[in-house]
Image (cartoon, rainbow, N blue to C red):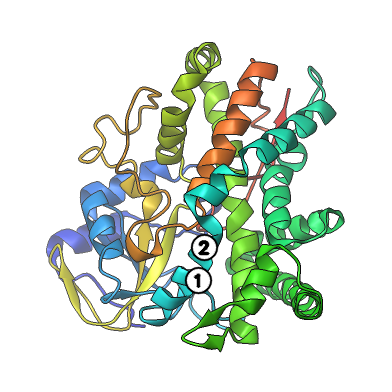
Amino acid sequence: MHTREPTTERDAMSNQQLTYSPFDPEVMADPYPVYRELRDHAPVYWSSQASCWVLSRYDDVSAALADPATYSSASGIFPTPPGVDMTDLFLPMLIMSDPPRHTQLRHLVSKAFTPRRIAGLETHIHTIVDDLLDQSPETGPWDFVSEFSGPLPAIVIADMLGVPREDRDRFRTWSTTLIQSNPVRGEFGAGLDAAAALYEYFSAFLADRRAHPQDDLMTALVQAEVDGEHLTEEELLGFCLLLLVAGHETTTNLLSNSAVILAQHPEDRRALADDPELVPAAVEELLRYDSPVQGLARTLTRQVDLHGQAMAAGDTVLLLFGSANRDDHAFPDADHFDINRRPERQVAFGRGIHFCLGASLARLEARIALRALLTRRRDWDVDIDSAVRLRSGPIRGFASLPIQ
């Protein structure tokens, strides 16, 4: 990894005027003004706080996602401050691999997310949503995250894996701790402890499924073979962690962000309540407007020259999905929320070989949850001053969201 100064006068001026770090609390609160500055004045920006280059324009982010041979995932996908090593935090997993192993593993796990299997979950998700809303107050204040947006995807993914429901609260705690761990504030140890707890739990669970196979995804993973060989223990544990965290954190934060956006746009909320057929397109706009995953990192396998700046092989590059989705060149008037927009090219779920496997499940859960919420809780207010944001750099959402 190389710390570099800008090589052109224009970029030098831009870097002196801009300060961007994905770990900055002010950026986490509202990253979009600084994203605009990056796109306009420093499209290739060196962040010394995160030891990485930052790409913010839609075309550049999309091109990088489409070129995994140059922008590798194998060395990690999370930017880290200088002196912080996160290599021990995660065991090998699909999202942190390159072809050919990535191709083999993705083919294997994609069987759990076929359109037919996802469609078959619709009735089950409706039941979960209705049960959660039945338990929430119709008028009084409640925590949207702990009582609705968090439990819903956690229950769904736990049921898919075959994990007992009584364990889902522990999973939520471990997952949130892992996502929230901000190494800038010395919280790296908490993330390690959460990951270790998850790995310990899944190791025992996998052993049980080997001895007592069931009709669930965990058993399917244990029995799966790639080129005649079973997955290693580390690969299995990596799969479990990825499916648990990615399987519900994205949906939790999509729903929480959506609740805030729709509270801020009551006319759009009323339009969706009056015509639920508008909800699927609105979900795409909600994903674009405030992406749950703001960006992920890659490592360069060769030198890349972009906008007059040379990025060297071995350098880390942060691809800002959240900024790309607010690029006016890709989405006219991008800072305006429009439920009638058709943002088919939004990159909230990435693109290319690492396109989020759970995207179709997240969309289904969001459509069902928002339709039910708009029907049964047609109007709501969010106490944004009392809300607690996630402290994670790449993940945008809330740890707590008071609503009534």
What type is the residue that disc 1 sits on?
Leu
Which one is in front, 374 or 90?
374
Q: Which residue is mark 1?
A: 108
Marks 2 & 1, CB-CB < 8 Å contact: yes
Q: Position of residue 401 (x, y in %)?
A: 69, 36
Which one is in front, 284 or 277?
277
Image quadrant containing the N terminus: bottom left
**Cα separation between marks 2 and 1:** 6 Å
What type is the residue that disc 2 sits on?
Lys
Q: Which residue is mark 2?
A: 111
Q: Which mark is residue 330?
A: none
In this rendering, is residue 116 above or below 364?
below
Q: Position of residue 226 (x, y in %)?
A: 49, 82
Image quadrant containing the C terminus: top right
The quadrant where residue 238 appears: bottom right
Identified at 84% across, 30% down, the residue is 135
Identified at 68% across, 49% down, the residue is 156
Q: Position of residue 179 (x, y in %)?
A: 63, 60
Does dot 1 land on a helix, a strand or a loop?
helix
